[in-house]
Image: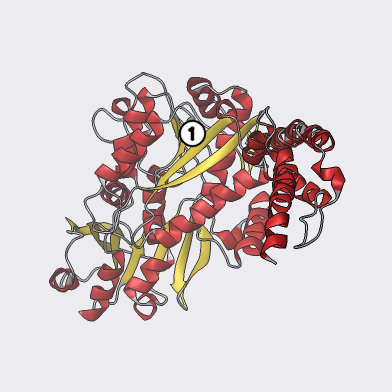
Protein backbone atom coordinates (compact mmCIF):
# COMPACT_ATOMS: atom_id res chain seq x y z
CA UNK A 1 0.00 0.00 0.00
CA UNK A 2 2.79 2.37 0.74
CA UNK A 3 4.30 1.66 -2.68
CA UNK A 4 0.94 2.24 -4.40
CA UNK A 5 0.32 5.43 -2.51
CA UNK A 6 3.79 6.65 -3.20
CA UNK A 7 3.33 5.89 -6.82
CA UNK A 8 0.08 7.80 -7.00
CA UNK A 9 1.23 10.81 -4.96
CA UNK A 10 3.17 12.60 -7.72
CA UNK A 11 0.26 12.17 -10.08
CA UNK A 12 -2.29 13.39 -7.57
CA UNK A 13 -0.13 16.37 -6.74
CA UNK A 14 0.19 17.26 -10.40
CA UNK A 15 -3.54 16.96 -10.90
CA UNK A 16 -4.23 19.19 -7.90
CA UNK A 17 -1.81 21.83 -9.16
CA UNK A 18 -3.41 21.73 -12.60
CA UNK A 19 -6.86 22.07 -11.04
CA UNK A 20 -5.73 25.01 -8.93
CA UNK A 21 -4.22 26.66 -11.97
CA UNK A 22 -7.49 26.25 -13.85
CA UNK A 23 -9.52 27.56 -10.90
CA UNK A 24 -7.51 30.72 -10.23
CA UNK A 25 -6.46 31.61 -13.75
CA UNK A 26 -9.65 33.54 -14.67
CA UNK A 27 -9.27 35.92 -11.74
CA UNK A 28 -5.56 36.57 -12.01
CA UNK A 29 -4.48 37.12 -15.59
CA UNK A 30 -1.34 39.05 -16.43
CA UNK A 31 -3.35 42.24 -17.14
CA UNK A 32 -4.54 42.49 -13.56
CA UNK A 33 -8.16 42.40 -14.68
CA UNK A 34 -9.13 40.26 -11.72
CA UNK A 35 -7.74 42.77 -9.21
CA UNK A 36 -9.48 45.61 -11.00
CA UNK A 37 -12.87 43.95 -11.11
CA UNK A 38 -12.62 42.80 -7.50
CA UNK A 39 -12.27 46.38 -6.30
CA UNK A 40 -14.33 48.24 -8.93
CA UNK A 41 -17.72 46.73 -8.33
CA UNK A 42 -19.45 43.82 -6.69
CA UNK A 43 -21.44 42.73 -9.75
CA UNK A 44 -18.28 41.77 -11.60
CA UNK A 45 -17.08 39.77 -8.59
CA UNK A 46 -20.42 37.99 -8.62
CA UNK A 47 -20.00 37.29 -12.32
CA UNK A 48 -16.62 35.72 -11.61
CA UNK A 49 -18.24 33.58 -8.92
CA UNK A 50 -20.89 32.41 -11.38
CA UNK A 51 -18.19 31.30 -13.86
CA UNK A 52 -16.41 29.20 -11.19
CA UNK A 53 -18.68 26.16 -11.56
CA UNK A 54 -17.31 25.72 -15.11
CA UNK A 55 -14.21 24.24 -13.43
CA UNK A 56 -15.50 21.74 -10.85
CA UNK A 57 -13.22 20.78 -8.01
CA UNK A 58 -12.24 17.07 -8.34
CA UNK A 59 -13.47 14.75 -5.67
CA UNK A 60 -10.96 12.61 -3.80
CA UNK A 61 -9.81 9.76 -5.96
CA UNK A 62 -11.37 11.12 -9.17
CA UNK A 63 -9.67 12.53 -12.18
CA UNK A 64 -10.55 16.05 -13.06
CA UNK A 65 -12.16 16.81 -16.41
CA UNK A 66 -9.40 17.35 -18.89
CA UNK A 67 -10.79 20.53 -20.55
CA UNK A 68 -10.21 22.87 -17.64
CA UNK A 69 -6.68 21.59 -17.22
CA UNK A 70 -5.67 22.77 -20.67
CA UNK A 71 -4.09 26.20 -20.31
CA UNK A 72 -5.33 27.27 -23.72
CA UNK A 73 -8.90 26.41 -22.78
CA UNK A 74 -8.74 28.25 -19.49
CA UNK A 75 -7.11 31.35 -20.95
CA UNK A 76 -10.19 32.65 -22.77
CA UNK A 77 -12.14 32.83 -19.49
CA UNK A 78 -10.82 36.29 -18.59
CA UNK A 79 -11.62 37.38 -22.14
CA UNK A 80 -15.14 36.08 -21.63
CA UNK A 81 -15.54 38.28 -18.58
CA UNK A 82 -14.22 41.39 -20.36
CA UNK A 83 -17.61 42.43 -21.66
CA UNK A 84 -18.57 42.87 -18.02
CA UNK A 85 -15.88 45.57 -17.69
CA UNK A 86 -18.01 48.22 -19.47
CA UNK A 87 -20.74 47.65 -16.89
CA UNK A 88 -19.78 50.83 -15.09
CA UNK A 89 -20.25 52.58 -18.42
CA UNK A 90 -23.66 50.94 -18.65
CA UNK A 91 -24.37 52.19 -15.15
CA UNK A 92 -23.53 55.77 -16.04
CA UNK A 93 -26.92 56.58 -17.52
CA UNK A 94 -28.30 55.98 -14.04
CA UNK A 95 -26.08 58.73 -12.61
CA UNK A 96 -27.92 61.52 -14.45
CA UNK A 97 -31.14 60.50 -12.69
CA UNK A 98 -30.79 63.38 -10.25
CA UNK A 99 -30.26 65.61 -13.31
CA UNK A 100 -33.47 64.22 -14.76
CA UNK A 101 -35.20 65.15 -11.48
CA UNK A 102 -34.05 68.75 -11.81
CA UNK A 103 -37.02 69.85 -13.92
CA UNK A 104 -39.13 69.32 -10.79
CA UNK A 105 -37.13 72.04 -9.01
CA UNK A 106 -38.91 74.93 -10.76
CA UNK A 107 -42.12 74.01 -8.91
CA UNK A 108 -41.31 76.46 -6.09
CA UNK A 109 -40.61 79.04 -8.81
CA UNK A 110 -44.12 78.50 -10.14
CA UNK A 111 -45.50 79.19 -6.66
CA UNK A 112 -43.61 82.48 -6.30
CA UNK A 113 -46.21 84.68 -8.01
CA UNK A 114 -48.41 84.11 -4.94
CA UNK A 115 -45.90 86.14 -2.91
CA UNK A 116 -46.02 89.78 -4.06
CA UNK A 117 -42.90 91.22 -5.64
CA UNK A 118 -41.41 93.94 -3.43
CA UNK A 119 -42.06 96.70 -5.92
CA UNK A 120 -45.74 95.83 -6.24
CA UNK A 121 -46.51 95.89 -2.50
CA UNK A 122 -48.10 98.87 -0.77
CA UNK A 123 -48.47 98.77 3.00
CA UNK A 124 -51.13 100.48 5.10
CA UNK A 125 -50.36 100.88 8.81
CA UNK A 126 -52.81 101.78 11.55
CA UNK A 127 -51.86 103.14 14.97
CA UNK A 128 -54.55 102.76 17.63
CA UNK A 129 -54.71 101.89 21.35
CA UNK A 130 -54.90 98.09 21.15
CA UNK A 131 -54.16 97.60 24.86
CA UNK A 132 -56.39 98.77 27.70
CA UNK A 133 -60.09 99.56 27.89
CA UNK A 134 -60.19 101.07 24.38
CA UNK A 135 -59.43 97.69 22.82
CA UNK A 136 -63.05 96.70 22.33
CA UNK A 137 -63.66 99.92 20.40
CA UNK A 138 -60.48 99.69 18.36
CA UNK A 139 -61.13 96.01 17.61
CA UNK A 140 -64.15 97.10 15.59
CA UNK A 141 -62.18 99.89 13.90
CA UNK A 142 -59.55 97.35 12.82
CA UNK A 143 -62.30 94.99 11.65
CA UNK A 144 -63.67 97.84 9.53
CA UNK A 145 -60.24 98.53 8.02
CA UNK A 146 -59.75 94.86 7.14
CA UNK A 147 -63.22 94.63 5.58
CA UNK A 148 -62.49 97.59 3.31
CA UNK A 149 -59.21 96.07 2.11
CA UNK A 150 -60.79 92.64 1.62
CA UNK A 151 -63.70 94.08 -0.33
CA UNK A 152 -61.19 95.59 -2.74
CA UNK A 153 -59.64 92.17 -3.25
CA UNK A 154 -56.52 93.16 -1.32
CA UNK A 155 -55.21 95.12 -4.28
CA UNK A 156 -55.60 98.36 -6.19
CA UNK A 157 -54.01 99.87 -9.30
CA UNK A 158 -51.89 96.76 -9.79
CA UNK A 159 -50.49 96.85 -6.25
CA UNK A 160 -50.96 94.26 -3.53
CA UNK A 161 -52.17 95.82 -0.27
CA UNK A 162 -50.69 94.65 3.01
CA UNK A 163 -52.12 95.92 6.30
CA UNK A 164 -50.35 96.11 9.66
CA UNK A 165 -52.13 96.83 12.96
CA UNK A 166 -49.89 98.75 15.42
CA UNK A 167 -50.56 99.47 19.10
CA UNK A 168 -49.86 102.94 20.47
CA UNK A 169 -50.86 101.95 24.03
CA UNK A 170 -48.98 100.06 26.73
CA UNK A 171 -50.15 97.65 29.40
CA UNK A 172 -48.52 99.78 32.07
CA UNK A 173 -50.35 102.96 31.06
CA UNK A 174 -53.57 101.29 29.92
CA UNK A 175 -53.83 103.89 27.15
CA UNK A 176 -51.80 105.52 24.38
CA UNK A 177 -48.33 106.81 25.19
CA UNK A 178 -46.09 109.28 23.43
CA UNK A 179 -43.23 106.80 23.16
CA UNK A 180 -45.43 104.15 21.57
CA UNK A 181 -46.85 106.58 19.03
CA UNK A 182 -43.39 107.89 18.11
CA UNK A 183 -42.20 104.32 17.63
CA UNK A 184 -45.14 103.49 15.35
CA UNK A 185 -44.69 106.60 13.23
CA UNK A 186 -40.96 105.97 12.86
CA UNK A 187 -41.60 102.37 11.86
CA UNK A 188 -43.89 103.59 9.08
CA UNK A 189 -41.38 106.19 7.93
CA UNK A 190 -38.53 103.67 7.82
CA UNK A 191 -40.48 101.17 5.70
CA UNK A 192 -40.42 102.34 2.05
CA UNK A 193 -43.51 100.25 1.28
CA UNK A 194 -45.72 102.20 3.72
CA UNK A 195 -47.82 104.76 1.86
CA UNK A 196 -50.77 105.34 4.27
CA UNK A 197 -51.06 105.64 8.07
CA UNK A 198 -54.56 105.23 9.54
CA UNK A 199 -54.67 106.90 12.93
CA UNK A 200 -54.76 108.05 15.50
CA UNK A 201 -57.63 107.35 17.90
CA UNK A 202 -56.62 110.02 20.44
CA UNK A 203 -56.07 113.62 19.39
CA UNK A 204 -53.09 113.90 21.74
CA UNK A 205 -51.39 111.03 19.93
CA UNK A 206 -52.00 112.75 16.60
CA UNK A 207 -50.09 115.82 17.81
CA UNK A 208 -47.05 113.57 18.26
CA UNK A 209 -47.00 111.77 14.91
CA UNK A 210 -48.48 114.38 12.55
CA UNK A 211 -45.29 116.41 12.02
CA UNK A 212 -43.18 113.25 11.67
CA UNK A 213 -45.42 111.83 8.95
CA UNK A 214 -45.75 115.22 7.27
CA UNK A 215 -41.97 115.34 6.81
CA UNK A 216 -42.15 111.89 5.23
CA UNK A 217 -45.05 112.78 2.87
CA UNK A 218 -47.15 109.92 4.27
CA UNK A 219 -50.93 110.27 3.98
CA UNK A 220 -52.47 110.15 7.48
CA UNK A 221 -56.19 109.46 7.87
CA UNK A 222 -57.86 109.53 11.28
CA UNK A 223 -61.08 107.64 11.99
CA UNK A 224 -61.55 109.26 15.42
CA UNK A 225 -59.56 112.47 16.13
CA UNK A 226 -61.89 115.37 16.89
CA UNK A 227 -59.71 118.17 18.34
CA UNK A 228 -60.28 121.18 16.01
CA UNK A 229 -56.73 122.52 16.34
CA UNK A 230 -55.31 119.57 14.39
CA UNK A 231 -56.71 121.05 11.18
CA UNK A 232 -58.51 124.37 11.70
CA UNK A 233 -56.58 127.65 11.88
CA UNK A 234 -57.62 129.74 14.87
CA UNK A 235 -59.70 126.94 16.41
CA UNK A 236 -57.06 125.46 18.70
CA UNK A 237 -53.88 126.31 20.56
CA UNK A 238 -51.38 128.94 19.38
CA UNK A 239 -49.48 127.78 16.29
CA UNK A 240 -51.97 125.09 15.37
CA UNK A 241 -52.28 123.55 12.83
CA UNK A 242 -49.14 124.91 11.11
CA UNK A 243 -46.86 123.29 13.70
CA UNK A 244 -48.02 119.91 12.38
CA UNK A 245 -47.12 120.82 8.79
CA UNK A 246 -43.35 121.44 8.69
CA UNK A 247 -43.31 120.89 4.90
CA UNK A 248 -46.04 123.49 4.43
CA UNK A 249 -48.44 121.02 2.85
CA UNK A 250 -51.34 118.97 4.16
CA UNK A 251 -50.95 115.23 4.68
CA UNK A 252 -53.47 114.76 7.52
CA UNK A 253 -57.20 114.36 7.08
CA UNK A 254 -60.09 112.87 9.08
CA UNK A 255 -63.41 111.28 8.26
CA UNK A 256 -65.15 112.27 11.52
CA UNK A 257 -66.54 115.73 12.40
CA UNK A 258 -64.47 117.81 14.84
CA UNK A 259 -65.34 118.94 18.36
CA UNK A 260 -66.06 122.50 17.29
CA UNK A 261 -69.40 120.95 16.33
CA UNK A 262 -69.79 118.31 19.04
CA UNK A 263 -69.01 120.49 22.07
CA UNK A 264 -71.41 123.33 21.24
CA UNK A 265 -74.15 120.97 20.04
CA UNK A 266 -73.88 119.13 23.35
CA UNK A 267 -74.55 122.41 25.16
CA UNK A 268 -77.52 123.12 22.88
CA UNK A 269 -78.94 119.70 23.71
CA UNK A 270 -78.51 120.40 27.44
CA UNK A 271 -80.47 123.64 26.99
CA UNK A 272 -83.26 121.68 25.27
CA UNK A 273 -83.42 119.43 28.37
CA UNK A 274 -83.91 122.53 30.55
CA UNK A 275 -80.47 122.45 32.11
CA UNK A 276 -79.86 125.79 33.85
CA UNK A 277 -76.69 125.03 35.85
CA UNK A 278 -73.74 122.82 34.91
CA UNK A 279 -70.49 121.70 36.54
CA UNK A 280 -67.72 120.85 34.06
CA UNK A 281 -64.86 118.37 34.44
CA UNK A 282 -62.08 117.35 32.05
CA UNK A 283 -59.17 114.88 31.99
CA UNK A 284 -56.47 117.47 31.05
CA UNK A 285 -55.81 115.78 27.68
CA UNK A 286 -56.07 117.47 24.30
CA UNK A 287 -59.38 115.87 23.41
CA UNK A 288 -61.03 115.96 26.83
CA UNK A 289 -60.03 119.46 27.90
CA UNK A 290 -60.65 120.77 24.41
CA UNK A 291 -64.22 119.55 24.10
CA UNK A 292 -65.01 120.58 27.68
CA UNK A 293 -63.82 124.10 26.92
CA UNK A 294 -65.94 124.27 23.76
CA UNK A 295 -68.97 123.03 25.72
CA UNK A 296 -68.33 125.67 28.37
CA UNK A 297 -68.04 128.50 25.86
CA UNK A 298 -71.34 127.56 24.26
CA UNK A 299 -73.05 127.30 27.64
CA UNK A 300 -72.00 130.86 28.41
CA UNK A 301 -73.39 131.97 25.04
CA UNK A 302 -76.82 130.42 25.63
CA UNK A 303 -77.15 131.40 29.32
CA UNK A 304 -76.43 128.09 31.02
CA UNK A 305 -74.70 128.90 34.32
CA UNK A 306 -71.28 127.31 34.70
CA UNK A 307 -70.83 126.52 38.41
CA UNK A 308 -67.24 125.38 38.01
CA UNK A 309 -64.69 123.83 35.69
CA UNK A 310 -62.01 121.49 37.05
CA UNK A 311 -59.54 118.99 35.72
CA UNK A 312 -59.15 115.54 37.26
CA UNK A 313 -56.06 113.35 37.53
CA UNK A 314 -56.85 110.23 35.54
CA UNK A 315 -54.38 108.19 37.59
CA UNK A 316 -56.48 108.59 40.75
CA UNK A 317 -58.55 105.62 41.85
CA UNK A 318 -61.67 107.54 42.93
CA UNK A 319 -63.21 111.04 43.06
CA UNK A 320 -65.78 110.88 45.86
CA UNK A 321 -64.51 113.98 47.67
CA UNK A 322 -64.77 115.98 44.46
CA UNK A 323 -68.26 114.64 43.83
CA UNK A 324 -69.29 115.66 47.34
CA UNK A 325 -68.05 119.16 46.62
CA UNK A 326 -69.96 119.30 43.33
CA UNK A 327 -73.11 118.00 45.01
CA UNK A 328 -73.04 121.05 47.25
CA UNK A 329 -73.40 123.34 44.21
CA UNK A 330 -76.64 121.61 43.18
CA UNK A 331 -76.04 121.35 39.41
CA UNK A 332 -78.64 120.19 36.90
CA UNK A 333 -75.92 118.42 34.92
CA UNK A 334 -72.28 117.36 35.23
CA UNK A 335 -70.34 117.43 31.98
CA UNK A 336 -67.22 115.26 31.70
CA UNK A 337 -64.79 115.95 28.89
CA UNK A 338 -62.75 112.76 28.56
CA UNK A 339 -62.76 109.10 27.66
CA UNK A 340 -63.37 105.71 29.19
CA UNK A 341 -59.60 105.40 29.60
CA UNK A 342 -59.38 108.66 31.57
CA UNK A 343 -61.86 107.52 34.24
CA UNK A 344 -65.21 108.52 32.75
CA UNK A 345 -66.80 105.44 34.27
CA UNK A 346 -65.34 106.17 37.73
CA UNK A 347 -66.72 109.71 37.64
CA UNK A 348 -70.21 108.35 36.95
CA UNK A 349 -69.96 105.73 39.69
CA UNK A 350 -68.69 108.19 42.31
CA UNK A 351 -71.47 110.66 41.50
CA UNK A 352 -74.05 108.09 42.51
CA UNK A 353 -72.09 106.88 45.53
CA UNK A 354 -72.29 110.35 47.14
CA UNK A 355 -75.93 110.89 46.17
CA UNK A 356 -75.32 113.23 43.23
CA UNK A 357 -78.23 112.16 41.04
CA UNK A 358 -78.31 114.92 38.43
CA UNK A 359 -77.83 114.26 34.72
CA UNK A 360 -74.42 113.36 33.32
CA UNK A 361 -73.28 114.18 29.79
CA UNK A 362 -70.19 112.72 28.14
CA UNK A 363 -68.73 113.00 24.59
CA UNK A 364 -68.04 110.26 22.04
CA UNK A 365 -64.81 109.27 23.81
CA UNK A 366 -67.05 107.46 26.28
CA UNK A 367 -69.37 105.92 23.73
CA UNK A 368 -68.15 102.37 24.16
CA UNK A 369 -69.18 99.39 26.21
CA UNK A 370 -66.11 99.77 28.41
CA UNK A 371 -67.57 103.01 29.81
CA UNK A 372 -70.85 101.32 30.79
CA UNK A 373 -68.99 98.42 32.39
CA UNK A 374 -66.70 100.73 34.38
CA UNK A 375 -69.56 102.90 35.63
CA UNK A 376 -72.08 100.13 36.24
CA UNK A 377 -75.14 100.20 34.03
CA UNK A 378 -77.45 100.87 37.00
CA UNK A 379 -75.52 104.10 37.72
CA UNK A 380 -76.14 105.37 34.20
CA UNK A 381 -79.70 104.19 33.64
CA UNK A 382 -81.79 106.92 32.02
CA UNK A 383 -79.55 109.76 33.25
CA UNK A 384 -76.35 109.57 31.17
CA UNK A 385 -76.45 111.39 27.83
CA UNK A 386 -73.82 110.83 25.15
CA UNK A 387 -72.95 112.94 22.11
CA UNK A 388 -71.38 111.40 19.03
CA UNK A 389 -69.85 112.78 15.82
CA UNK A 390 -72.11 110.99 13.38
CA UNK A 391 -74.84 108.38 13.54
CA UNK A 392 -74.71 105.22 15.66
CA UNK A 393 -74.64 101.87 13.81
CA UNK A 394 -78.34 101.12 14.24
CA UNK A 395 -79.27 104.45 12.65
CA UNK A 396 -77.18 104.11 9.50
CA UNK A 397 -78.91 104.19 6.12
CA UNK A 398 -77.99 103.29 2.55
CA UNK A 399 -74.36 102.31 2.18
CA UNK A 400 -73.86 102.74 5.92
CA UNK A 401 -76.56 100.21 6.73
CA UNK A 402 -75.16 97.84 4.11
CA UNK A 403 -71.78 98.03 5.88
CA UNK A 404 -73.37 97.33 9.27
CA UNK A 405 -75.25 94.33 7.82
CA UNK A 406 -72.04 92.91 6.33
CA UNK A 407 -70.23 93.50 9.60
CA UNK A 408 -72.89 91.67 11.61
CA UNK A 409 -72.82 88.76 9.16
CA UNK A 410 -69.02 88.54 9.26
CA UNK A 411 -68.39 89.15 12.96
CA UNK A 412 -71.62 87.98 14.56
CA UNK A 413 -72.53 91.20 16.38
CA UNK A 414 -73.16 94.92 16.04
CA UNK A 415 -70.04 97.05 15.59
CA UNK A 416 -69.14 99.85 17.99
CA UNK A 417 -69.73 103.39 16.81
CA UNK A 418 -66.31 103.97 15.24
CA UNK A 419 -66.13 100.78 13.16
CA UNK A 420 -67.70 102.50 10.16
CA UNK A 421 -65.11 105.29 10.42
CA UNK A 422 -62.29 102.74 10.32
CA UNK A 423 -63.93 101.25 7.23
CA UNK A 424 -64.32 104.68 5.59
CA UNK A 425 -60.72 105.65 6.38
CA UNK A 426 -59.45 102.49 4.68
CA UNK A 427 -61.67 103.10 1.65
CA UNK A 428 -60.19 106.59 1.39
CA UNK A 429 -56.69 105.06 1.51
CA UNK A 430 -57.56 102.68 -1.33
CA UNK A 431 -59.10 105.49 -3.37
CA UNK A 432 -56.03 107.70 -2.88
CA UNK A 433 -53.75 104.92 -4.16
CA UNK A 434 -56.08 104.30 -7.11
CA UNK A 435 -56.10 107.98 -8.09
CA UNK A 436 -52.33 108.33 -7.73
CA UNK A 437 -51.78 105.20 -9.80
CA UNK A 438 -48.20 104.81 -8.64
CA UNK A 439 -46.18 103.87 -5.59
CA UNK A 440 -45.18 107.35 -4.54
CA UNK A 441 -45.85 108.78 -1.09
CA UNK A 442 -46.30 112.38 -2.15
CA UNK A 443 -48.54 111.47 -5.09
CA UNK A 444 -50.76 109.34 -2.84
CA UNK A 445 -50.80 112.07 -0.20
CA UNK A 446 -51.90 114.69 -2.71
CA UNK A 447 -54.55 112.38 -4.17
CA UNK A 448 -55.96 111.59 -0.73
CA UNK A 449 -56.38 115.08 0.68
CA UNK A 450 -57.97 116.31 -2.56
CA UNK A 451 -60.81 113.75 -2.58
CA UNK A 452 -64.17 115.32 -3.38
CA UNK A 453 -67.70 113.91 -3.61
CA UNK A 454 -66.67 110.57 -2.15
CA UNK A 455 -69.64 108.22 -2.18
CA UNK A 456 -68.84 106.13 0.87
CA UNK A 457 -70.48 104.33 3.77
CA UNK A 458 -70.98 107.67 5.54
CA UNK A 459 -72.75 109.21 2.56
CA UNK A 460 -71.44 111.60 -0.08
CA UNK A 461 -68.82 113.96 1.29
CA UNK A 462 -65.53 115.74 0.53
CA UNK A 463 -62.36 116.87 2.29
CA UNK A 464 -62.17 120.64 2.67
CA UNK A 465 -59.01 122.71 2.30
CA UNK A 466 -57.91 121.78 5.84
CA UNK A 467 -58.41 118.03 5.48
CA UNK A 468 -61.72 117.99 7.38
CA UNK A 469 -64.79 116.11 6.26
CA UNK A 470 -67.74 118.16 5.07
CA UNK A 471 -70.09 115.91 7.05
CA UNK A 472 -71.80 117.74 9.93
CA UNK A 473 -74.23 115.21 11.36
CA UNK A 474 -74.08 114.67 15.13
CA UNK A 475 -76.27 112.49 17.32
CA UNK A 476 -77.31 112.06 20.93
CA UNK A 477 -78.02 108.86 22.86
CA UNK A 478 -78.97 107.87 26.40
CA UNK A 479 -77.92 104.80 28.36
CA UNK A 480 -80.79 102.39 29.01
CA UNK A 481 -80.61 98.73 29.91
CA UNK A 482 -76.84 98.79 29.64
CA UNK A 483 -76.92 100.03 26.04
CA UNK A 484 -76.65 103.29 24.14
CA UNK A 485 -80.11 104.13 22.85
CA UNK A 486 -80.43 106.70 20.06
CA UNK A 487 -82.41 109.82 21.00
CA UNK A 488 -81.97 112.37 18.22
CA UNK A 489 -79.83 113.97 15.54
CA UNK A 490 -78.05 117.02 16.91
CA UNK A 491 -76.75 118.52 13.68
CA UNK A 492 -77.85 118.85 10.06
CA UNK A 493 -77.63 115.70 7.94
- Mark 1 Cα shell of 10 Å, populated few (<14), some (14-19), many (≥20): many
Residue 457 seen: no
Above or below — where is 207 with respect to 143? Answer: above
Quadrant position of residue 239: top left
Counting every numbered tag in the picture gives: 1
User: Relative to 171, is 73 on the left or the right?
Assistant: right
Q: Is residue 453 visible?
A: yes
Residue nearer the viewer, 164 or 248: 164
Please provide percent x and percent y for residue 67.
86, 44
Q: Residue at x 52, y 42 (%)?
A: 163
User: In terms of image quadrants, where is residue 235?
Assistant: top left
Q: What secondary structure is found at the residue carrying circle 1? A: strand
Residue at image point 40% right, 66% down: 385
Between 374 and 357, the residue placed more toward the observer is 374
Q: Is residue 427 left or right of residue 52?
A: left
Mark 1 sits on what residue? 196
- Camera-nearest residue between 6 and 223: 6
* x and y, in percent, of residue 59 in the image: 77, 61
Along the line of sight, the residue nearer the viewer: 136 or 265:
136
Relative horizontal placement of residue 398, taking residue 231 as reference (left or right): right
Against 175, is 411 above or below? below
Quadrant where the N terminus sits is bottom right
Residue 80 locus on image (x, y percent): 83, 35
Amino acid sequence: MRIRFAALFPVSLALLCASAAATFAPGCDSKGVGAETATRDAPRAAAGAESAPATPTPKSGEKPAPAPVTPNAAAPAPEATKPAVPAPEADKPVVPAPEAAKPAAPAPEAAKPAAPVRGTVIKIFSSLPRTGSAKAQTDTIVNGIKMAIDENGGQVAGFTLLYQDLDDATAAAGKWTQDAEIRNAQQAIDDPDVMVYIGTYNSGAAKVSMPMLNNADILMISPANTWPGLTKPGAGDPGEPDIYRPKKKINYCRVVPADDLQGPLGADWAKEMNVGKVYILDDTEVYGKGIATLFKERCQEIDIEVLGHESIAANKQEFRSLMTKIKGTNPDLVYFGGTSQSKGGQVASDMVSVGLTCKLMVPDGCREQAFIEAAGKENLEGRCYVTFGGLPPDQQKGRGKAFVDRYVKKHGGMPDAYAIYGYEAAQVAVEAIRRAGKKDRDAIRAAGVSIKDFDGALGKWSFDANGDTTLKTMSGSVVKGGEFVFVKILGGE
